Image (cartoon, grey):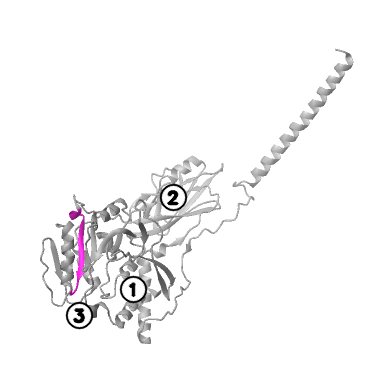
Amino acid sequence: MPRNQRIFFSGVIFVAIILLSFYYMDDVFRRKTSFQFIRGTSCNNKPGIQDYPKPNIGPFPIENSQSCTCKNTDPPDMAQDELEVLKKHRAEEYRQHLIRTGKENDVLVLAPPNTPLQYPIKGCRVIPLHQSFIPGLALHTQHRTIYKVSLRVQKGLLSINDVKEDELVLGQNEERLTISSDNLEKLNNLLSRVTYTSTIYHIKTEDLAYFSFENHEVIFPIEIRRLSVPILYNPGKDINSQVTILVKTFLRYAELKVLIQSIRVNYPNIKIIVADDSHDPQKVVGDNIEQYFMPPAQGWFAGRNLAVSQVTTKYFLWVDDDFLFLNETRIERFVEIMEALPELDVVGGSVHGNQFSFRLHYEEGNTEEGGCISRGSGTHKAPLPGFEGCFFTDIVVNYFVARTDAVRRVGFDPLLRRVAHPEFFIDGLGHLLVATCRDLKVGHQVPKNTGEYNSYRHPPKHDEDNKMRIYYFKNHLKCIK
């Protein structure tokens, strides 16, 4: 190769080496300064380095202080001094209701962002006065010289099982527990042995645990609950051991006889329970019929309570004494739906082609004035999964199958004698899951003109006024729209 070419290639190589040297020097510099920036802004325990501000995560009380509105709202029709006494008694009963239902534990707790703390957000349940482990506690963070966490509670005592001499634990069997270690793995081992023992006896309440590390704090609930014993019903082998038919009768023995005859066409052996508060009671004759006589004119809900109290089957079917079973009336279809969806409590059908289903909208209102309920015709437009023509609702017609234990928990208010049906579903709002199905049919007998019965069927105005007083006090309502 000629000399001038060798000089040229040597120069090119030399320039390339110089350029590469500058590149790598610049890259090292950039990586070094980036690392220093990241290290300087990361969370560590060196003096003088500030962490981000500690957020306010609660707990915040959940209070509905806004007044609900109703048109033409009037207080119960009574003297002013009587109304003031009633308000005072209602306020005290409502205060006790909030305690009984655990409203004091109804708080809002926020999850902080980017926390290194691991903790249970749901499912930490303990038996009152018994020691239980708190599951899932751990710390995930970068290297520290010392790791220090603390826990505090209000309704119990904290401790760590089998603490060794070289393990730094302060506050054993106290409401506040502090754990320190120079090793993260050892610290998490200690956290896995933290226990909680409630210091109060309550069958259903809640404590809030505060778990903190440096400037991080989280809050999680500890549920204190006494275990309940299940109540099960043996369903047997056929519809007769699964369902009891209930009916309340008053002065309509002719209609009741027709109803029973129509039932026996397809269900000759099913038990029928009759609650009877007629003035001149008559014995209803027939196999597998239980007739319970009441004092005269005790009313609709008192009769329902009596009938339900005598049921021994898992379900009952409610019918009026002037209904008529049709060829297509099939109780088995009700049971099929209830068994497929164990969450359901009540399933209604249709009477003479009418479902009479309604939706309820409830606003709690404020503590002093009370709440508001409005009623709308129809369903929630939410279909029952797997069953065409069935939808969730809040009120159904007087032809329904219900779970016996669920209805007993709600009950029927015997103060409501003649004007009563939606009131049961109002009391059950939030407790009973209700649905209606259009193809579950029963007929209705041709109405007869019976003067004495009609005088009770259409009560005077003071019965309606009395019902509003019951709403006002018992249901803490301002109005019903």
Tell me whether the residue at label 3 lies in contact with that at label 1, contact meaning CB atoms closer than 8 angstroms.
no
- Residue type at mark 3 is Glu
The C terminus: image quadrant: bottom left
Q: Where is 263 relative to 479, above or below? A: above
Which residue range is magenta in the image?
239-251
Helix, strand or loop at disc 3?
helix
Foreground mark, 3 or 2, reads: 3
Dot 2 falls on a residue whose secondary structure is loop
Which amino acid type corresponds to the residue marked 2 in the rendered image?
Pro
Q: Mark 2 points at which residue?
A: 120
Seen as rendered, the residue at the extreme top is: 1
Residue at the location (17% across, 77% down)?
296
Image quadrant of residue 241?
bottom left
Asked if one can make out residue 229 in the rendered structure from this viewpoint, the answer is no
In this rendering, is residue 198 above or below 453?
above
Q: Residue 375: which quarter of the image?
A: bottom left
Q: Which mark is residue 452?
A: 3
Category of crowding for the residue at label 3, using alpha-carbon neighbours closer than 10 angstroms: few (below 14), some (14–19), many (at least 20)? few
Q: Which residue is drawn at 44% across and 42% down?
A: 189
Say which residue appears at 34% left-offset and 62% top-offset: 431
Of marks 3 and 1, which one's residue comes earlier in the chain? 3
Residue denoted by label 1:
474
Q: Is residue 386 left or right of residue 263?
A: right
Check residue 249 for magenta coloring.
Answer: yes
Left/right of residue 286 with respect to residue 333 in the rendered view:
left
**Vertical arrangement, residue 18 with respect to residue 347, above or below:** above
Distance CA(mark 1)–CA(mark 2): 38 Å
Going by the numbered disc 1, the residue's amino acid type is Lys
Q: Locate residue 95, reporting x and y percent.
A: 38, 71
Of marks 1 and 2, the one in the foreground: 1
